[in-house]
Image (tube, coloured by chain):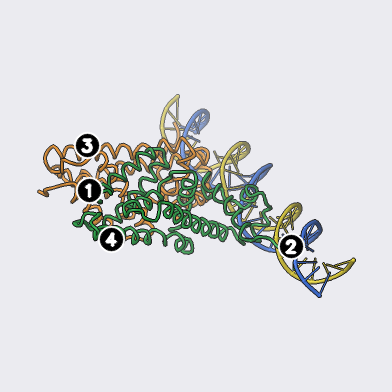
Chain colours: A orange, B green, C blue, D yellow
Amino acid sequence: MPRQADHDARRRQIAEAVWRLAARGGLEDVTLRQVAAEAGVSARLLQYYFGTRDRLLLGALEILNADAEARAAERLAGLGEAAGTRALVRGVLLEMLPLDEERRNRQVVYAAYFVRFLVEPALAAVAGAATPALEELVTGLIVRAQHTGEARGDLDAAGEAAYLLAGAEGLQSGVLLGQRDADRAVALIDRQLDRIFTATT
Amino acid sequence: MPRQADHDARRRQIAEAVWRLAARGGLEDVTLRQVAAEAGVSARLLQYYFGTRDRLLLGALEILNADAEARAAERLAGLGEAAGTRALVRGVLLEMLPLDEERRNRQVVYAAYFVRFLVEPALAAVAGAATPALEELVTGLIVRAQHTGEARGDLDAAGEAAYLLAGAEGLQSGVLLGQRDADRAVALIDRQLDRIFTATT
DNA sequence: TCTTTTATGGTTCGATCGAACCATAACACG
DNA sequence: CGTGTTATGGTTCGATCGAACCATAAAAGA
C-alpha cells in the first residue's frame, strides 16, 4: 500500500543513539529529544517506533542484547572449528572485558541500566538471562575438559566456572574505571586458566 | 553569634536521602526536589549545604565513601585481634557482597554512580581510590600468609589478590540482580580461599 | 491518476527541573 | 533586651521533559 520503511533498521538506528547517550552520560541523558537529535530523526519517530520512553529503554536494551549475543557467537566461531576447550572458555571470558570500543560501549550501557534492572521487572528479565546461561556453558566446557584430561579433575567445575565469570565481570569494572590495564586483566584471566587447565596442546 | 546548626549532621541527613533515592531509581531520580522531600527539608537547604546538584552528588558520594571505609574497618576489627590472615582476607571480600541492607544499599548507590565515574573526573577520583588500596592490602596479607606457611607458596600473591577481589565484585552484581544466593556467593569465595590457604588453624 | 495507508515532522501542554532570589525565624552575644 | 548573623522556608524563572496531538509527504495499489 504505502511508503514502506525498514522498521528494523529504524529501530536499530534509534537504539544506537540511545546506547551512545547512555554510555556518555547515563540514562538521565537519554531524553526523547536528545535521542532524536543523536539519531537524526524527529522526536515523533521515537514515539512511533517505541512508544513511551520506558519502552524505548526496553527496546534499545533488547536490541543491544541480541547484538551482544550475535557478536559473541561470531567471535567464538572465529576461533576456529577445532578450538580447544580452554580457548573457548577464554573466549567467553574475554567477551566480558572491554577489549574494543564495541564491547566497551556495550558494557558501559549495561552499567547505565544496572539500577533499573533491580527495579523494573521487564528489564530484569532481559538482563538476567545471559549470565546464568554463560555459567552453565562454562561449567559444561570445564566438565568436558575434565573428561578429556585437559582440565584438572579434582576441582569443582561449577564453582570454578562461577568464579571465573564473576572475576571477569569484576575485571571489567576495573578496566572501565581505568584502574587496570586491559592487557593485565587478560593476563590475570590466563593465569587462572593455567591453574584450571593442565596441558596446552 | 547566631542559631548554630550541626552542619555535618545536616549534610549526612541530606546525603542519606540521596542514597535512598539513587538506590531506588538511579541518579535520574535524585532531583533537588525529591531529595528535599526525602530528607524532610526544603530544597533551599540543599543549595545552602551543597550548592549545585553536581556538588550534591559529589558530596553525598564522599560521605558514603567515608562511611563505607569506617564500617569496613569496624567490621574487620570486630573479627578479633588475633584473627587469622585468611579470616582477614575473607572479611575484606565479604565487605563487597550485599550481605545486609547497609552494604546492599551502598553497593547499589555505587552502581548508580558508575557511568558518571567514567565521565566526571571529580567523581572518578573519589571512587577510584578504594579498589587499588584493597588490592595492595590483600596482596600483602597473602604474602604474609605465605611467609608463615598459612598460604601456598607457589602462587602469585598479587594475581590471586586481584582475581579474588574481582570475583567478589562480580559476585556482588549477581547477588544484587537476584541471580545468585548470597550464601552461595560466600561459599564460592570460601572455596577459592581453600585453594589459596593451606592449614586452617 | 487517484486513493488510501503509512511514515515522518512539527507543535503544544502541563509538569518538573535546577538555580537564583526574597523573605524571616531562630538564636548567640553585646 | 536588642541586634546582627545564620540557618531555613518559599517563590519564581527560563529551560526542558514526556506525551499527546495535528499535519502532510511519500508511495503502493486501484
Depth check, mark 3 against mark 2: the one in front is 2
What number is the disc on residue A140? 3
Left or right: where A181 falls relative to A21: left
Chain ID for label 1? A
What number is the disc on residue A90? 1
User: How far is mark 1 from mark 3, CA to CA?
Assistant: 14 Å
What number is the disc on residue B144? 4
Q: Residue at x 43, y 58 (%)?
A: B118
Q: Amino acid at mark 3?
A: Gly
Q: Residue beneath label 2, please?
A: B3
Left or right: where A35 falls relative to B11: left
Dots 4 and 2 on the same chain: yes
Q: Residues within 10 Å of mark 4 (few under 14, many from 20)?
A: some
User: How far is mark 3 from mark 4, CA to CA?
Assistant: 36 Å
Can residue A185 be seen by looking at this rendering?
A: yes
Q: Earlier in the sequence, mark 4 or mark 2?
A: 2
Dots 1 and 3 on the same chain: yes
Q: Residue at x 38, y 42 (%)?
A: B174
Q: Residue furthest left?
A: A201
Chain ID for label 2? B
* Secondary element at image label 3: helix
Q: Amino acid at mark 2?
A: Arg
* Secondary element at image label 4: helix
Q: Is residue A179 above or below residue A93?
A: below
